[in-house]
Image (tube, coloured by chain):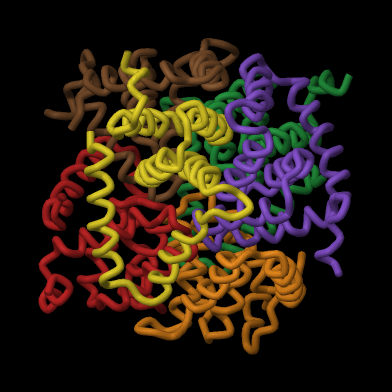
Chain colours: A red, B orange, C purple, D green, E yellow, F brown
Amino acid sequence: METAAEYAKRRETLNDQVLFQADLPTKRFFALDHDVYSEGALPKKTKELMGLVASTVLRCDDCISYHLTESVEQGASDQEITEALSIALVVGGSITIPHLRHAMAFLDTMERPGAGSREA
Amino acid sequence: METAAEYAKRRETLNDQVLFQADLPTKRFFALDHDVYSEGALPKKTKELMGLVASTVLRCDDCISYHLTESVEQGASDQEITEALSIALVVGGSITIPHLRHAMAFLDTMERPGAGSREA
Amino acid sequence: METAAEYAKRRETLNDQVLFQADLPTKRFFALDHDVYSEGALPKKTKELMGLVASTVLRCDDCISYHLTESVEQGASDQEITEALSIALVVGGSITIPHLRHAMAFLDTMERPGAGSREA
Amino acid sequence: METAAEYAKRRETLNDQVLFQADLPTKRFFALDHDVYSEGALPKKTKELMGLVASTVLRCDDCISYHLTESVEQGASDQEITEALSIALVVGGSITIPHLRHAMAFLDTMERPGAGSREA
Amino acid sequence: METAAEYAKRRETLNDQVLFQADLPTKRFFALDHDVYSEGALPKKTKELMGLVASTVLRCDDCISYHLTESVEQGASDQEITEALSIALVVGGSITIPHLRHAMAFLDTMERPGAGSREA
Amino acid sequence: METAAEYAKRRETLNDQVLFQADLPTKRFFALDHDVYSEGALPKKTKELMGLVASTVLRCDDCISYHLTESVEQGASDQEITEALSIALVVGGSITIPHLRHAMAFLDTMERPGAGSREA
C-alpha cells in the first residue's frame, strides 16, 4: 500500500499537472478548495473532519487520505477520527466499509507520535 | 413550503409507519442512527453538523432538514451552519446548490431566538 | 400523497411524452428496461424485488413506487418486501430512510387483498 | 407542474436567500458556476448541453430545468436536446428515466417559437 | 488480478483492523451487516444476489467480490448471476460496465466445480 | 500507470469476457452504448465530450479513459477537453479532482501529434 508520504508526493505532482493545463475556472476552484477549510467560526480541525466525513460517504479514497492527513496535522485524535468515520458509515451504509478499511490502513502508514498502540 | 414543525411531525408519523412493519435489522439500524450522534470525543453539535455536511453532499433534503433542526437545537450558530454548508458545496459541487436553497428556506421556517436578522 | 393508481397513470402519461420525442437509442432502452425483468433463471418476482433494492440504494422514489407495484403484482409478501428494504437500508445507509418512508406510505395507497393488518 | 417562468422566479429568489447569508467561498463558487459556461473553445450552447447531461446523470431536476432553459436560449434544437438526454440515459441507466420525464414536461411549459409540434 | 482467495484474506485482515479501533456503533453496524443477509422469508441466496445488484449499481468492486463469493457459496448459478448483473446494468447504466468486467474477471479466479465452461 | 494503449487492450479483453457470458439484455445494452454516440444533430466529437463530462461527474476513471480516447480521435483539442473537465469539476465538486488527475495523466500516455508542449 502507498504510504501517507508517497501519497502526498503523488498528489502534489498530479495537481501540478492538472493546474499546468487548467483554465481559469479550474484554477479558481482549486483556490476555493483550499480556502473553505480555513479557520473560521468552526475550527480548522473540525472542518477537516467534515471533509473526511464527506469524502467517506462519497467514497473517495484519495480524498479520505487527504483529509486524514490534514485532520491528524490539526491534532485530531484517533477517537475523534473514529467517531467521524462512524457517522459516515451509518449515513452512507455498508458500501462505505471498503473506505473505512482504506482509512485505517492509511492511518497506519502515517508517522504519528504516540499512535503506536493499535499495533501492540 | 413545509415548516420545520410540520416536517418534524410528518417525519415522526412516517418513521412510526416504517418501524411498525420493520424487521429486526431495520429496528437496530434506527437505534444505531440515533446513537452515532451522541456526545463523545466529538461534541454532539459537531456531529450534527457533520450529519448536515454528509446529507448535503448526498443531496437529501429530508436529511438536511433533520440535521439542521438538531444542529440549531445543539446551539450551532448561523455562521457555523454557513461554513458547514460551504464545505459541502465545494466538495459536492453545483449539483448541491438546490439543497443549499432548501437549507436556507428551511432555516427560515424554524423558530429561533435572535435569528431574525436575515429578514431585516 | 399520490396514490398507487394516480402514480401509475401519471407515469404512463409522462412515458408517452418521453417516447413521443425520443430517438432510437431511448426507445430501445425503454424496451430493454422492460425485458430485463422477464421470467428467466430468476423468477420475475425476485427480479422486481432486485429492482426495488437497486431503486432504494439509488434513492429514486419514483422507481421504488414502480417496483413495489410490480413486486406486489408478482405476489411478493409484506415480509419479503420488508427484507428487501432492510438490505437496501444496510447497504445504502441512513440516507435511504426517507425512501423507506416513501415505500411504506406508497404501499398503504395500494389496493391489496389481505394487507389491511398494518392499519389495525 | 411549475412552469419554466415560475421556476426561474423561484430559483432567483432562493439564490438571493442563499447569497444573503453566504460566506466568501460560497459567493466565489456561485461566480465560478456562472463563468464555467461562458463561450470559449466550446460554444456556450454545447456547454449548457453538457450541463444538462451532467445534471441528468446526477439526477437533479432543478439543475435540469436550469440547463434546459439556458440550452434553449442558446438555440439548442429539440433534436440536440433529445440526443443529449439519450446519452445521459445510457450512461446513467433507467434510474434517470423519471428525470427524462421531468425534462420533457418542463420543456412543454417553456414558451418557444415553433416548438408546438409535439402537442399536435 | 487479486484472486478470490487473496481478496477474502485481505478483506478479513482489514476488517480486523477496522474493528480493532472501532467504536460501538461501528461494531453494531458490522453485526447488522451480517444479520441482514440471513435466511428469512427470502432465501439467503436471493439476498446475496440482491447485495450483488446493490453493489453493482453503487459501483463498489470490493462489495461485488464479496457478494459474488457468497452468492456462489449459496449455489447461485452462472445464469442467475448474469441475470442479476443485467438488471444492475440497465438500472445503473453504462457507468456500471467496468464493474461488470470486474465481476466476470473475479468469477474466473474462484474455484468452482463445473464452472470451467466459459474458458472452453 | 497503465498507458492508453494498454488500457484499450485490457478493456477489449474484459468486454469480450463480459459478452461471452452475457444474456440478451446485456448484449443489447452494449450495442446501445455504441449507437448513442453516433454522429447526429450533435457531432460525434461533442457527444464523446459529453460522455467525458458524464463520466467525470460520476467519477469513473475507466469511462474517462474511454471517452478521452474517443474525443481525441474525433479531433477534440486540449482546450476543448480542459473546458469540458472544468464544467465537470464545477458541477461535481472537489470530489472529482482525483479524476481530473487521472484524466491528465492518461492524456500524457496517449500518442498525439503536436501534444508534446505540456511536457516542455
Q: Nearer the viewer, residue E101 or E117?
A: E117
State whether residue F90 appears in this view: yes
The residue lying furthest to the top in this view is F39
Quadrant for residue C33, please give it: top right
**Quadrant the C terminus of chain A occupies:** bottom left
Q: Nearer the viewer, residue A92 or D29?
A: A92
Q: How many marks?
A: 0
Task: Decide if residue A51 is on the left or right side of residue D29.
Answer: left
The residue lying furthest to the front in this view is E113
Residue B120, position as x, y percentages in the image = 67, 78
Task: Decide if residue E63 is on the left or right side of residue B6.
Answer: left
The correct choice, above or below, for F30 with respect to B16 in the image is: above
Residue D101, position as x, y percentages in the image = 73, 35
User: What residue is shown at x 20% (from left), y 28% (from top)?
Assistant: F2
Residue D86, position as x, y percentages in the image = 60, 24
State whether residue D24 appears in this view: no
Q: Nearer the viewer, residue B119 or D88?
A: D88
User: What residue is shown at x 49% (from left), y 35% (from top)?
Assistant: D38
Q: Nearer the viewer, residue F15 or F57?
A: F15
User: What residue is shown at x 61% (from left), y 38% (from top)?
Assistant: D95
User: What residue is shown at x 50% (from left), y 26% (from top)?
Assistant: E79
Residue F50, position as x, y percentages in the image = 48, 27
The correct choice, above or below, for E55 with respect to A5 in the image is: above
Task: Decide if residue A72 is on the left or right side of residue F63.
Answer: left
